């Protein structure tokens, strides 16, 4: 097969993940030939710094690939084959607010779940629409946007309503990260797993995990009930660079002890263990602080090292499943490989009982111009109830953004499972409006 080298634009070029994504792409070599990588961001200074690291990665792994760095949409998107979107509207300083404001009111403070996720969604909807419009104006008509920007469930719903015909596929690395851990537990390569899954983004369950046709759910269930989604060695050595992730994977233990039927996405801890999560959180220092003092700091240190021409910096930026997954999805679509991956797409009857326009996370075969979803069918009442509540909270938020409606925003917050009452919902919403006055549409 003659493989046309691809032009890939990365929106949110200044992201902590950019270098890892570029490395994962270039590691595919002749399987996925790349002609050019373009970084695009609205923060020139941040992106110029990150570009130093990306340039290092390109020169080290594929010096023939062109790299360009721009804040001009036309330069970034002209003739692109793919746009990878990974923007964080308001950057880490606003993520800190998303996490700390709800915690001050005794509620879960998280980037994409609960009140924090709703606030982040309200900031992100219209910048994402603008990005899609840039892509449609300048890129090839066959260009796909693969979107990692969070909160993916809310972004996906808004895009489906406001730009229903756009070629945007929303994806998430969390199920793949879980599959990585499950494959470590089973002692196999994660590419050997054949999984079935249903839900919304950051809100779903694995219903089957097969290796060579053999169902591994029973053995995994038993393991997780003892150790969580970690190997015994990982539990003993706590060998993950970031403590909050160890805690997250361990929290699957009580979840699967209580609800052994299916294996949960780790984000369900925020909805099913909300009280414990709040007790374990420190409102003065949240995940945003951990990232700023960890992943982000390490990245900027690596950049300074390169500027000083000082040795090998490979360990200093995030690679792993995040980069590999988006590269795998793009490759399957570019060359019509129809590989099976979990993606976020319109329900259209896939999960019985949910509306057709719900954006659900399910397995699908990914082709050049088409995504071929795999039917889920009926889901038991417990999951149906949880899904409906979360979906309607997210839909009220998108209604609020589109209509500029305070009441619908309040409905979104009041309906969320992490918030105990309409009174608390109003207190959080009013503080969020104040904190987000530079970003949110006006709500009346
Ligand atoms: P980051 O803050 O390091 O980088 C985001 C970049 O986006 C910044 O450089 C910022 O200036 C830029 N940006 C903001 N608004 C923009 C706009 N309108 N146009 C272009 N660029 C813009 O953030 P990060 O931690 O690397 O995360 C990036 C995104 O990826 C976030 O939305 C995050 O939630 C998401 N993410 C998703 C997954 C997933 O699997 N779905 C996993 C990790 C991160």
Image (cartoon, rainbow, N blue to C red):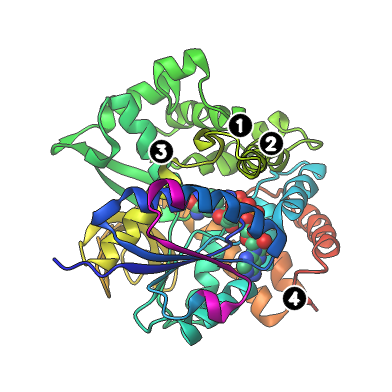
Residue 39 picture quarter: bottom right
Q: Nearer the observer, disc 1 or disc 2?
A: 2
Q: Earlier in the sequence, mark 1 or mark 3?
A: 3
Q: Residue at x 47, y 80 (%)?
A: 78
Queried whether the magenta region covers residue 75, the answer comes back as: yes
What kind of element bears circle 3?
A: helix
Label 1: element kind: helix
| Magenta region | 58-76
Label 3, label 4: how many angstroms apart (C-alpha)?
Answer: 35 Å
Q: Quadrant of the C terminus?
A: bottom right
Q: Which mark is residue 178?
A: 3
Tell me: is circle 1 under 8 Å from ligand 1: no
Q: Residue furthest top?
A: 236
> Residue 80's spot in the image, x, y percent?
42, 75
Q: Who is closer to the viewer here, 219 or 305?
A: 305
Q: Which residue is mark 4?
A: 441
The residue labelled by disc 2 is: 290
Q: Whole-Å distance between the Cαs marked 1 and 3?
A: 15 Å
Name the residue beneath numbered marker 1.
244
Q: Is residue 278 left or right of residue 69?
A: right
Circle nearer the viewer, 4 or 2: 2
> Do tag 4 and tag 2 residues touch (Cβ < 8 Å)?
no
Furthest-front residue in this view: 309
Q: Residues within 10 Å of mark 3 (few under 14, many from 20)?
A: many
Q: Out of 159 and 388, give the one closest to the viewer.
A: 159
Residue at image coords 40%, 76%: 167
Which is more N-terminal, label 2 or label 3? 3
First in sequence, mark 3 or 4: give its number. 3
Which comes sooner in the sequence, label 4 or label 2? Answer: 2
């Amino acid at each position: 097969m003659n493989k046309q080298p691809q032009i890939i634009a990365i929106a949110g070029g200044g992201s902590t993940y950019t270098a890892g994504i570029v490395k994962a792409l270039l590691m595919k070599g002749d399987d996925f030939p790349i002609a050019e990588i373009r970084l695009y961001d609205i923060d020139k200074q941040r992106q110029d710094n990150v570009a130093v690291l990306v340039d290092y990665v390109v020169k080290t792994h594929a010096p023939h690939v062109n790299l360009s760095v721009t804040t001009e949409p036309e330069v970034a998107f002209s003739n692109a084959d793919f746009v990878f979107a990974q923007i964080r509207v308001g950057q880490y300083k606003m993520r800190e607010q998303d996490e700390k404001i709800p915690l001050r009111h005794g509620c879960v403070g998280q980037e994409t779940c609960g009140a924090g996720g709703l606030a982040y969604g309200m900031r992100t909807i219209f910048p994402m629409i603008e990005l899609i419009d840039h892509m449609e104006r300048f890129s090839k008509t066959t260009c796909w946007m693969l979107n990692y920007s969070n909160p993916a469930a809310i972004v996906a719903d808004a895009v489906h309503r406001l730009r229903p015909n756009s070629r945007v596929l929303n994806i998430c690395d969390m199920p793949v990260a879980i599959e990585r851990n499950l494959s470590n537990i089973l002692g196999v390569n994660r590419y050997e797993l054949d999984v079935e899954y249903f839900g919304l983004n950051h809100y779903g369950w694995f219903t089957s995990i097969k290796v060579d046709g053999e169902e591994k759910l029973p053995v995994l269930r038993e393991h997780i009930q003892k150790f969580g989604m970690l190997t015994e060695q990982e539990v003993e050595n706590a060998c993950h660079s970031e403590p909050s992730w160890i805690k997250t994977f361990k929290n699957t233990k009580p979840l699967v002890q209580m609800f052994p039927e299916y294996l949960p996405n780790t984000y369900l801890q925020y909805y099913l263990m909300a009280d414990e999560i709040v007790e374990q959180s420190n409102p003065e220092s949240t995940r945003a602080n951990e990232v700023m003092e960890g992943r982000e700091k390490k990245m900027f240190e690596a950049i300074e090292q390169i500027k000083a021409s000082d040795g090998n910096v490979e360990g200093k930026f995030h690679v792993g499943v995040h980069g590999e997954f988006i590269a795998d999805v793009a490759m399957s679509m570019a060359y019509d490989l129809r590989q099976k991956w979990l993606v976020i797409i319109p329900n259209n009857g896939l999960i019985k009982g949910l509306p057709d326009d719900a954006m659900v996370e399910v397995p699908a075969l990914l082709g050049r111009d088409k995504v071929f979803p795999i039917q889920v069918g009926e889901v038991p009442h417990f999951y149906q109830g949880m899904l409906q509540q979360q979906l309607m909270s997210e839909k009220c938020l998108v209604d609020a953004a589109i209509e500029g409606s305070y009441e619908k925003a309040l409905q979104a917050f009041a309906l969320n499972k992490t918030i105990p009452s309409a009174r608390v919902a109003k207190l959080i919403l009013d503080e969020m409006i104040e904190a987000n006055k530079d970003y949110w549409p006006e709500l009346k």
